[in-house]
């Protein structure tokens, strides 16, 4: 029987919630017994994805929501961060290192590059109704035992 | 984010404490620019020993400060980054702009 679990939280696309998202995902992932490096990698990737929602998804003053779903099956964690914002016009361009659509705001344009470096896979789906970033990472020495 | 500073022999030492992300980026930019406007410095050392977290937003903040100080010919150096922060610095090539010192 496979060990599995999931959680999902939805919060407003505000920068103050980035820290909340990081703590939340870290608390959930502890069940898999990750190393400090692995948990820091996951927190950083989540922070990048949530920052994209906060900065780019809702360009008007009215901020929408961000949903973070985390699930694991055996030793692999899957995290999906989604918004219902304006979407990314050119995903390929957005994933290029140092590309930013807001150069006047001193942005590094390294968000997707960091996600790709710290996680095993990163998939992005986007249209005019929103964006979904799905990331996976295998925990090297997972020792999870879920009691149902 | 809490930022502490002191000047010694015309060198500005800055200690970043806490988390540097989108939420704290603006405060960090404003505070560093204010500290960097001190006319009596010829070098800046940013100590990251108390920085608990940073993502790529922090890289944007630091590159922005580098560009401003470059116009004054004042170099910025980094010291005591965590292994996590160092990973991001190496990935983005930040050490080419702000060398690491021990």
Image: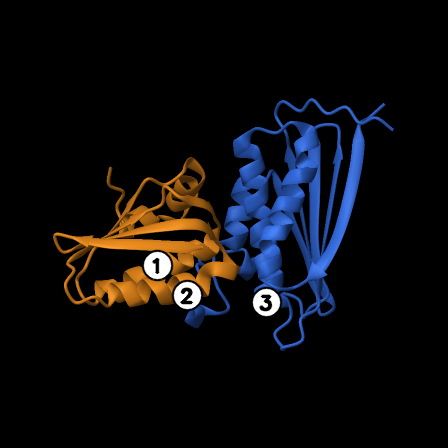
Chain colours: A blue, B orange
Q: Which mark is residue B10?
A: none
Residue at x-position 77% and y-position 44%: A7
Mark 1 Cα shell of 10 Å, populated few (<14), some (14-19), many (≥20) = some
Does residue A85 appear in the picture of this structure? Answer: yes
Report which residue position mark 1 lands on.
Answer: B63
Q: CA distance from mark 2 to mark 1?
A: 8 Å
Q: Are marks 2 and 1 in contact (CB under 8 Å)?
A: yes
Q: Chain of mark 2?
A: A
**Residue B89's quadrant in the figure?**
top left
Q: Is residue A137 above or below residue B21?
A: above
Residue under numbered circle 2 = A106
Q: Position of residue A78 (x, y in %)?
A: 70, 41
Task: Look at 63% across and 77% down and name the residue there.
Answer: A60
Q: Is residue A107 visible?
A: no
Seen from the viewer's position, the closer of residues B17 and A55 is: B17
**Is A73 placed above or below B26 here?**
above
Q: Quadrant of residue A130?
A: bottom right
Have a look at marks 3 and 1 and say if they share a chain: no
Q: Which residue is under mark 3? A: A56
Q: Earlier in the sequence, mark 3 or mark 2?
A: 3
Spot occupied by residue A102 in the image (x, y as percentages of width and height): 48, 69
Q: Nearer the viewer, residue B19 or B85?
A: B19
| Secondary structure beneath label 2 | loop
Numbered disc 3: secondary structure: helix
Q: Residue A90: image x %, image y %? A: 59, 64
Q: Give how far apart the Cα atoms at labels 3 and 1 are.
A: 21 Å
Q: Position of residue A131 (x, y in %)?
A: 69, 61
Q: Tag 3: Cα neighbours inside 10 Å, few (<14), some, or many (≥20)?
A: some
**Based on the displayed image, in which of its 4 quarters is residue A108 positioned?**
bottom left
């Amino acid at each position: 029987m496979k060990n599995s679990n999931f959680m999902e939280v939805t919060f407003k696309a505000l920068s103050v919630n980035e820290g909340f998202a990081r703590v939340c995902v870290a608390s959930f992932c502890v069940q898999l017994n990750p190393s400090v490096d692995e948990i820091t990698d996951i927190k950083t990737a989540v922070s990048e994805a949530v920052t994209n929602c906060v900065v780019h998804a809702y360009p008007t003053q009215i901020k929408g929501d961000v949903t973070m779903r985390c699930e694991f099956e055996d030793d692999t964690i899957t995290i999906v961060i989604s918004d219902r914002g304006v979407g990314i016009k050119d995903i390929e361009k957005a994933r290029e290192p140092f590309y930013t659509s807001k150069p006047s705001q001193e942005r590094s344009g390294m968000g997707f590059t960091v996600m790709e470096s710290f996680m095993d896979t990163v998939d992005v789906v986007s249209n005019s109704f929103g964006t979904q970033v799905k990331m996976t990472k295998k925990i090297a020495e997972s020792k999870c035992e879920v009691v149902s | 984010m809490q930022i502490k500073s002191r000047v010694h022999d015309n060198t500005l030492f800055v200690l970043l404490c806490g988390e540097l992300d989108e939420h704290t980026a603006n405060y960090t930019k404003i505070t560093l620019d204010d500290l960097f406007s001190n006319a009596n410095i010829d070098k800046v050392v940013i100590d990251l020993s108390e920085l608990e977290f940073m993502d790529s937003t922090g890289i944007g903040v630091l590159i922005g400060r580098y560009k401003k100080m470059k116009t004054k010919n004042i170099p910025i150096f980094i010291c005591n980054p965590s292994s996590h922060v160092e990973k991001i610095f190496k990935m983005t090539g930040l050490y080419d702009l702000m060398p690491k010192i021990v």
